[in-house]
Image: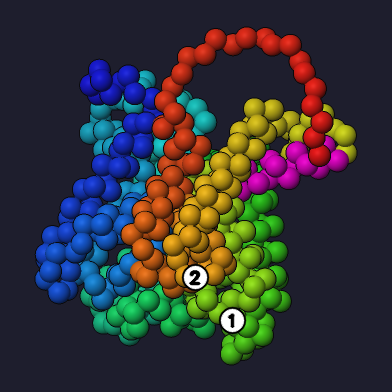
Amino acid sequence: MSKKLRTLSDTRILVLGYFAVIILGAILLKLPFATRSGESTNFFDAIFTATSATCVTGLVVYDTFSHWTLFGQLVILSMIQVGGIGFMTLFAYMNFSIGQKMGYHNSRLVMESAGTMSLSGISPLVKKIVNGTMIFEIIGALFLSIRFIPRFGVLNGIYMAVFHAVSAFCNAGFDIMGRLQPNSSMAQYQDDPVVMITLMMLIIIGGIGFYAWSDIIANRFKFKKYQLHTKVVLATTGILLLSGTVLFFVFEYNYAFKDLSIGDKILASLFQSVTPRTAGFAAVDQSKLSESGSILTIIFMFIGGSPGSTAGGIKTTTVAVMVLSVIAYAQEDHDVTAFKRKIEDKMVRRSCAIIFIYFIFVLTATLIICMFEPYSVRDILFETVSAVGTVGLSMGITAQLTVLSRIILIVLMFAGRVGALSFVLALAGKQNVAHLERPTGKIMIG
């Protein structure tokens, strides 16, 4: 790495790396043979698509199958894979594969990209991440092939299975179901348990996080031996899935799910509780959700997946720490604890900062877009949270938004992928401020 790059913070290098991937992807998507019409795509639309793919979001201005050729789709799929695993993780994997060691600075970049908490054991973790990703995606593609090959033929069926397996595991939400009906997402398979369950498993596994999966594999599914991080991730994920399934079933029984059988309603409820965190596939038209269902979906999109995963959002652990801190305060307990372990005070403060920054991003973006767009606050809020949470679900207004609104969504998607806190730190730059012990003052709050 050059001396100039070494002077940049780790966060800035990661931000610049993702930016470079987006620019390269946009250039490739702008090539005439990337589109079915043979005409060059507007560069701004190419940037939007490349950002959505690299940031594993799924918001689109064109139906992926109808607009892009096989070349264009493969470019999108490549960006999804790079964005899902992390370009620094892939770079490290290639280095380790040819027997090269990484310096301290590069190892720190990999540590931040992979979401691990220690520099030790970087090489084994990177190999587990890439190899594990390939294994899960192949297994998912095999299950999807059971349904896709009979319907689309061997080659097309395998391609569709691989595309959707990668998109699901990376929590991207891109689909090529436009082969059946443009912008239909997974609605054609809303009553197919094989497709729905396979996609859900890929989304959940990809959204739990590589560090947590490494811990689970190392301790042979013995919950008591797991690290605190893994316990909190699994507990929070389980609570969200269970509560979400029940609430969506109740809220949408006579709305979005009204034409479905009881069994299909349960399946759709489970899928709707999984996909907002943060996959972006839709089994039902999101614009048909009830007001309650829309709000619940927005909340789930805001929460997202877990740290060190392919998912976005403020993360499950952030929500868990905040809930636990509220409980501790209500009980007049000075320590925030989980599973008989104290959570560091700086983690509580960091959680507050992350939630506040995401909230400000969403609020500011929604207010600005509302000034220029004729859509309801619900539709616009749904869009902005979907962007910053790197989800990809939409009320169907993305393609109709003005250039300014889409620029805002691009910024939100980018910030959501690198992390809103990291994004702010990258913009602010590193400042060396001497620590001073200042006198204590009192203010009244609440």
Outermost residue on the front side: it is 371
Identified by mark 1, the residue type is Ala
Q: Residue at x 25, y 20 (%)?
A: 4
Q: Quadrant of the N terminus?
A: top left
Check disc 2: other Cα within 10 Å, few if <14, some if 14-19, many if 20+. few
Specify the segment rendered in magenta. 314-330
Disc assigned to residue 176: none
> Does the magenta stretch mainly form a helix, a strand or a loop?
helix
In the drawing, does residue 12 fall left or right of residue 312?
A: left
Spatial separation of the CA atoms under disc 1 and disc 2: 20 Å
Is 159 positioned to the left or the right of 406 in the image? left
Q: Nearer the viewer, residue 391 or 428?
A: 428
* Residue drawn at the location 46% of the way across and 31% of the way down: 425
Mark 2 = which residue? 375
Task: Specify the label residue 256 is tagged with.
Answer: 1
Query: Is the residue under label 2 in contact with that under label 1 (CB below 8 Å)?
Result: no
User: Is residue 192 within the magenta segment?
Assistant: no
Q: Residue at x 77, y 18 (%)?
A: 441
Q: Quadrant of residue 340?
A: top right
- Secondary structure beneath dot 1 equals loop
Q: Residue 364, percent across and down?
A: 52, 49
